[in-house]
Image (cartoon, rainbow, N blue to C red):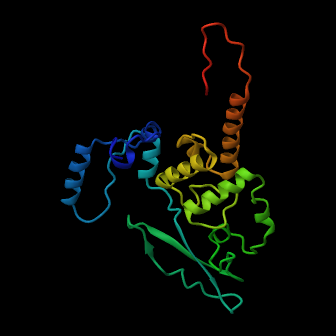
Amino acid sequence: MWDETGMSKGYQMKDLSQAKGYFAIAPSQGVSSLLATLCQKPGDCLIGLDRTKPYIQYLLSNCQNLQQLTAYFTSPTQNWQVNPWQDIEVRDRLDTLTNCEGVQLEEMPLTENGEINLNLLFGGNSSFGKTARQQQQPRTQTEHQLVQIFEEVLKLSPVGIEDNFFELGGHSLLATQLVSRIRQTFEIDVPLTMVFQSSTIIELAERVDGIRSLLIDIQTAPSEDLKPGEEEIEL
């Protein structure tokens, strides 16, 4: 992160990032690092990491690779006897070998628009029944509005009220858009940190309703009798 430059300008989670081991480098350090990197062979360079932090030590250690590439498919054949993916070698940008497997489905889960339903697919539910999803349907007006906002910002449908914003593909830039939409829709001022602290629609709805309820209480609270010379301040 380039300190107070570009998207990091006014970033409210900088202290948390530094605590985990990510330095906020100065623009001059960023330019110097870029020039140094261009002199090296093609590859990936990690810049601005604090090796004294346990989190960074874990990332840089030789740990078990948990990456998994899965192919979901349908076939008229009941069960494949041979796994065609077992001998395929796929490596990521750091040249780390990724595990591959295939999952045969009776049918591909689709949305009402005929597109592949990624929520159900990644959820690992091979039956794709509606019962499991009914528990995640919005129950209040606030949850209904937040579901619509999530789907528009993430360009993903359907979204359940227990789905995590970041697990659905959200990131800091989309979180900024999400907060902006929440402010416009509910006409309240909410901080960006609220999305990081409450990443599901259930949690966000509780926070939004709490703020709106507090504002209503403040606006409707009867003012005390003013003494001579005092003026009432409107909130």
**Left or right, 97 with reference to 112:** left
Residue drawn 38% across and 66% down? 93
- Taking the view exactly as shown, the residue that stands out farthest to the top is 228
- Taking the view exactly as shown, the residue that stands out farthest to the bottom is 76
Q: Quadrant of residue 35?
A: bottom left
Q: Quadrant of residue 91?
A: bottom left
Residue drawn 71% across and 89% down? 78
Image coords of residue 18 (percent x, y): 42, 39
- Taking the view exactly as shown, the residue that stands out farthest to the right is 131
**Left or right, 28 with reference to 206:** left
Quadrant the C terminus occupies: top right
Residue 195 to residue 109: above or below? above
Image coords of residue 177 (percent x, y): 51, 53
Q: How many marks?
A: 0
224 or 61, which is in the foreground? 224
**Left or right, 105 with reference to 194:** right
Residue drawn 24% across and 54% down? 34
209 or 78, which is in the foreground? 209
Residue drawn 32% across and 49% down? 47
Image coords of residue 30 (percent x, y): 26, 48
Residue 180 to residue 99: above or below? above
